[in-house]
């Protein structure tokens, strides 16, 4: 700590999370740098990346092909074309090779899709038995982004474009093409033009999130491989790998194309210049890490007693605030994700869980806590990336610049300290500072 303060040439922070502030100023993360923390976050990133490899492919499939299907019973039945779809950040033909692995669907994912937990049976039975990747979690994230629109405006131009006349004209063409030869649906569209337009906006968010996760899956695969090779040895190194990835891929185009009867309709053209960082990554972090919405069936919320915020910006039900104990309740998004990650845990993480708490009896809860720790590390990477882009280097010699950096970090941490609606109690920042949180 002394070294950090001498280096920054600033007096100690008076913030209640001063230790975390000093750690961020020293180039660290909100989560302490311990071998156990590093092992947990790397292992859970690997377990997350495998189902994510399905999520992004299916999200693009739904946005591009299923599109406005009124009864999309088979939207989770990913065609071979999308399993073979090359990730733009893996494989020999990558736009930018982040992961050294293959560009097609991950081998562990393909193996699970074939056998699941119950063995090799027809795909429909796997689906009905719920022995599959839980795409409902991915859709919950997409809907959180759709509901919490207009974040980071005016930098984020994606949402304003969805309300523009240009978007409406592009969507109208695609809607009419999709329902060509179906006078009933065309009649409904004429009578209620906003109905299918809103469905089109949702499809655009399917594409947005799919393009976002197409980047994150190879990032997590590669950092896992580097850890296995002994090349990632500290939490800051893992975090900085994410920071470097954010800058390397920040300009990746975000768009929405629908393919109807062999023709491509550019609902959101690449030429609009929407980018991965501002139109996808930052809105995703805000909507999913911070906000989301109360999970139905897990708590009783009394709006009249102001237990639920009246403003969306005050929602605090994301992963950084989530209560781990309802994990296991059927159907809620955290449970769906933990169940997906359970199938792909690396051996060292399985062994770690077997020795803790109640072993396999509470493994979903243990995964939930680990995932929460790891997402505080991801959020730290976002903090450091924004500080790099907007403010000053950590080793800047100008005290005014260092004060600006500190003010930025303290403002970010303040979000976990607000007393309104129980935010301070809900935030898990204090919990993740010790290994006892399990």
Image (cartoon, rainbow, N blue to C red):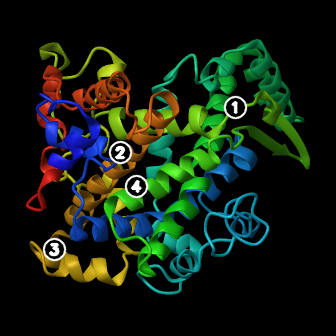
Q: Are marks 2 and 4 in contact (CB under 8 Å)?
A: yes
What separation in Å lies between label 1 and label 2 (alpha carbons)? Answer: 24 Å
Q: Are marks 1 and 2 in contact (CB under 8 Å)?
A: no
Residue 114 drawn above or below residue 186: below
- Whichever of callouts 2 and 4 sits on the residue coming sooner in the sequence is 4
- Whichever of callouts 1 and 2 sits on the residue coming sooner in the sequence is 1
Q: Position of residue 58 (x, y in %)?
A: 62, 56
Q: Which residue has dot 1 on it?
A: 274
Q: Secondary structure at mark 2?
A: helix
In the image: residue 287, left or right of residue 3: right
Circle 1 or circle 4, nearest the eye:
4
Among the 4 quarters of the image, the one containing residue 294: top left
Front residue (pair 213, 434) = 434
For mark 3, does the 10 Å Cα neighbourhood hold few (<14), some (14 to 19), or many (20 or more) residues?
Answer: few
Q: Secondary structure at mark 1?
A: loop
Q: Which residue has dot 4 on it?
A: 239
Front residue (pair 47, 5) = 5
What separation in Å lies between label 2 and label 3 (alpha carbons)? Answer: 31 Å
Q: Which residue has dot 3 on it?
A: 361
Q: Secondary structure at mark 3?
A: helix
- Identify which residue is drawn at 27% across, 53% down: 372
Q: Which residue has dot 2 on it?
A: 380
- Identify which residue is drawn at 25% across, 32% down: 413
Q: Position of residue 7 (x, y in %)?
A: 27, 42
- Whichever of callouts 1 and 3 sits on the residue coming sooner in the sequence is 1
**Outermost residue toward the bottom in this view:** 119
Front residue (pair 159, 65) = 159
């Amino acid at each position: 700590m002394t070294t950090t303060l001498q280096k920054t040439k600033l007096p100690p922070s008076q913030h209640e999370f001063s230790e975390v502030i000093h750690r961020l100023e020293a180039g660290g993360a909100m989560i302490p740098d311990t071998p156990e923390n590093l092992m947990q976050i790397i292992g859970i990133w690997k377990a997350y990346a495998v189902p994510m490899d399905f999520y992004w492919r299916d999200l693009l499939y739904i946005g591009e092909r299923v599109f406005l299907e009124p009864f999309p019973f088979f939207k989770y039945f990913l065609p071979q074309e999308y399993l073979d779809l090359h990730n733009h950040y893996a494989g020999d033909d990558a736009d930018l090779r982040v992961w050294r692995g293959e560009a097609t669907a991950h081998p562990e994912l393909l193996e699970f899709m074939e056998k699941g937990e119950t063995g090799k049976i027809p795909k429909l039975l796997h689906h009905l038995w719920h022995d599959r990747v839980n795409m409902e979690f991915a859709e919950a994230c997409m809907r959180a982004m759709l509901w919490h629109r207009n974040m980071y405006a005016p930098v984020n131009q994606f949402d304003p474009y969805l309300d523009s006349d240009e978007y409406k004209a592009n969507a109208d063409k695609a809607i009419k093409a999709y329902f060509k030869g179906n006078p009933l649906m065309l009649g409904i569209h004429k009578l209620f033009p906003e109905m299918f337009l809103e469905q089109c906006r949702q499809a655009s968010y399917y594409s947005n999130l799919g393009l976002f996760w197409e980047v994150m899956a190879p990032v997590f695969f590669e950092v896992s491989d580097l850890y296995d090779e002994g090349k990632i040895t500290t939490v800051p190194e893992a975090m900085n790998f994410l920071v470097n990835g954010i800058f390397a891929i920040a300009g990746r185009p975000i768009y929405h194309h629908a393919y109807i009867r062999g023709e491509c309709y550019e609902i959101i053209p690449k030429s609009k210049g929407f980018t991965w960082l501002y139109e996808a990554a930052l809105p995703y972090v805000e909507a999913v890490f911070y906000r989301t919405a109360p999970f139905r069936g897990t708590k009783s919320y009394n709006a009249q007693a102001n237990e639920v915020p009246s403003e969306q910006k005050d929602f605090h039900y994301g992963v950084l605030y989530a209560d781990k104990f309802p994990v296991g309740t059927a159907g809620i998004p955290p449970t769906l994700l933990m169940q997906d990650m359970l199938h792909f845990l690396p051996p060292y993480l399985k062994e770690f869980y077997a020795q803790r708490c109640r072993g396999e009896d509470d493994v979903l809860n243990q995964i939930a806590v680990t995932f929460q720790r790891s997402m505080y590390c991801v959020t730290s990477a976002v903090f450091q990336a924004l500080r790099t882009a907007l403010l000053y280097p950590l080793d800047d010699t100008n005290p005014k610049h260092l004060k600006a950096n500190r003010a930025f970090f303290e403002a970010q941490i303040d979000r976990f300290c607000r007393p309104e609606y129980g935010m301070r109690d809900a935030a898990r920042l204090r919990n993740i500072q010790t290994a006892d949180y399990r």
